[in-house]
Amino acid sequence: MSDNGFEPKIIAFLCNWCTYTGADLAGTSRLQYPPNVRIIRLMCSGAVDPIYVLKADLAGVDGVLIGGCHPGDCHYQEGNYKARRRVVALKEIVKSAGLEEDRIWLRWISASEGQRFADTVTEVTEALKKKGPNPLKNEWAV
Amino acid sequence: MSGRFRLEERLVKTTIPVENNQTLAAVQGFLRQLLESGAVEALLVPMRTPHGAVTPALVSNPDLLAAADPLAPVMPGNNATQAGKLSIREPRVKVGVVLRACELRALVELVKLQQASVDDMTLIAVDCAGTYEVPVYQGRRANGDEELWRALYQAASNDPDALDPEIRLACHMCEQPVYEGADVTLELLGSDLGQEIRVSLPDELGAKLGLSASEPNARAEVVEKLVAARTARRDAEFVAIRERLEGDEGLIGVFDACIRCHNCMNVCPICYCKTCVFKSAVFDHEPLQYVGWANQKGAYRLPADTALFHLTRLNHMGLSCIGCGMCTQACPADLPVGPVFRAIGQRLQATFEYLPGRSLEEPLPLITFKEDEWLQVGYE
């Protein structure tokens, strides 16, 4: 299942209450999705410090996926709304700095959406395969 | 632009006479009046030290105001930081702070970041015609030019395109050389400084100091022309730096020579965190960890995370960057820190329709949100 053998490495920061549980549901439902994603569980998408995303990108990770509850469903009322603003700001900075904003993905996936989680991982993986590896992967001087 | 500020009080324009071309003495006299009248209990103002340097000081003895030099075209630091120290918590006294426009904008941001309070403060704005870097300024002074400011104000008032090229780039790019939201403003632009100094202040204070209203002068037109010239220069710098940032170099290339000394952060009025993540244990690693990273890419840059440092700082203060250029002035590698932060900051600020320093009422964009915004984000 590879184009020229390139398998993107994706880091996913998932909120405990929705997307991580959705990923869990995808697993217990035995849904198939690409194994390219490395999941890190956080309590809230609002707990994703942009520095985590930047560090991963500069280290050469091919893609970062942030998953949170749908707007209005945040366990902490407003964490995902703040995450949304942070991602908008982060993408603006990344783009203005000459880096690739389309390696950063934000998706709202609820605890009951195992299929949406599997579909999202498939979609991100396919898009990054098409895009190619992160050019910073072999840059030591970053 | 409304900074604060006591909108219920009416500001009146008055004139302080200048005798024998002694403009600085007239300014000092006005500050002395403020202190002696009890309008303020102390003044934060740029002072000339006995050895000739310019430094901000908190002055409580009116006699020492003979050394005050708010006209000196040099900016060793952004004094919003010092104003914050004098006001961050109670108890505190009524202080007057003499600041340039970029310092007042920084102060507004610091209030919103809960690092300053203007509640007991009298804001005294000084129209700015631009400043030199410290060594340039000291060199010019050593060559005997004691009134460097005079030529700068004259040029700014008469021929705004002819700004001294040795003025800091941040000042060439400064499209907000005046601040309209202060309590007291020394309106130095558009006046014949050999004759008089125009001051706007609340009528109550004017009455207290025995100053009466006077006719408006040419300041508004002068400022308009100056702003147009500076805006043009700013936009040209933005085009140049964006070409590099969005071209092959990118931010990583532009900041390639960074040694991560943190000078830009230390002098930044907005970067206030006492325990910055970059000075924390997060960036301390086990010796073997470095070898592991070296093995991954074949080599590992040390000190590490230079690009991460700048990108993170952009995240933390880019929305509040008021463009004072202290970062550029402090950079030992002569990197264009200020232009980069201003260029990217402008994009960020436009995204959130936020203008740093504009108003105390506008919340910082990243501590607030609306439910019905960027509705496609997370679904596309």
Image (spheres, coloured by chain):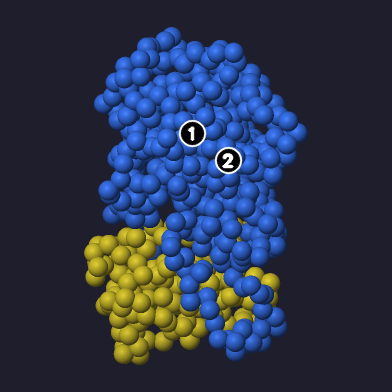
Chain colours: A yellow, B blue
- The amino acid sitting under disc 1 is Leu
Res A129 quadrant in image:
bottom right
Q: Please provide percent x and percent y for residue A126.
A: 52, 75
Q: Nearer the viewer, residue B140 or B154?
A: B140
Residue in the picture at 51% in, 68% down: B278
Res B273 quadrant in image:
bottom left
Residue in the picture at 26% in, 26% down: B8
Look at the numbered disc 2 and give the secondary structure of its residue: loop
Q: Please provide percent x and percent y for residue B136.
A: 70, 41
Q: Nearer the viewer, residue A31 or A77?
A: A77
Q: Nearer the viewer, residue B146 or B260?
A: B146
Residue B353 versus residue B162 in the image, above or below: below
Please indicate, yes or no, whether residue A15 appears anywhere in the rendered image.
Answer: yes
Q: Sequence order check: which comes first, mark 2 or mark 1?
A: 2
Label 1: how many Cα within 10 Å (few below 14, some 14–19, many 20+): few
- The answer to whether residue B186 is left or right of residue B139 is left
Image disc number at residue B49? 2
- The answer to whether residue B342 is left or right of residue B6 is right
Image disc number at residue B166? none
In the rendered structure, the residue with mark 2 lies on which chain? Answer: B
Residue in the picture at 44% in, 77% down: A12
| Residue to which mark 1 is pinned | B64
- The amino acid sitting under disc 2 is Thr
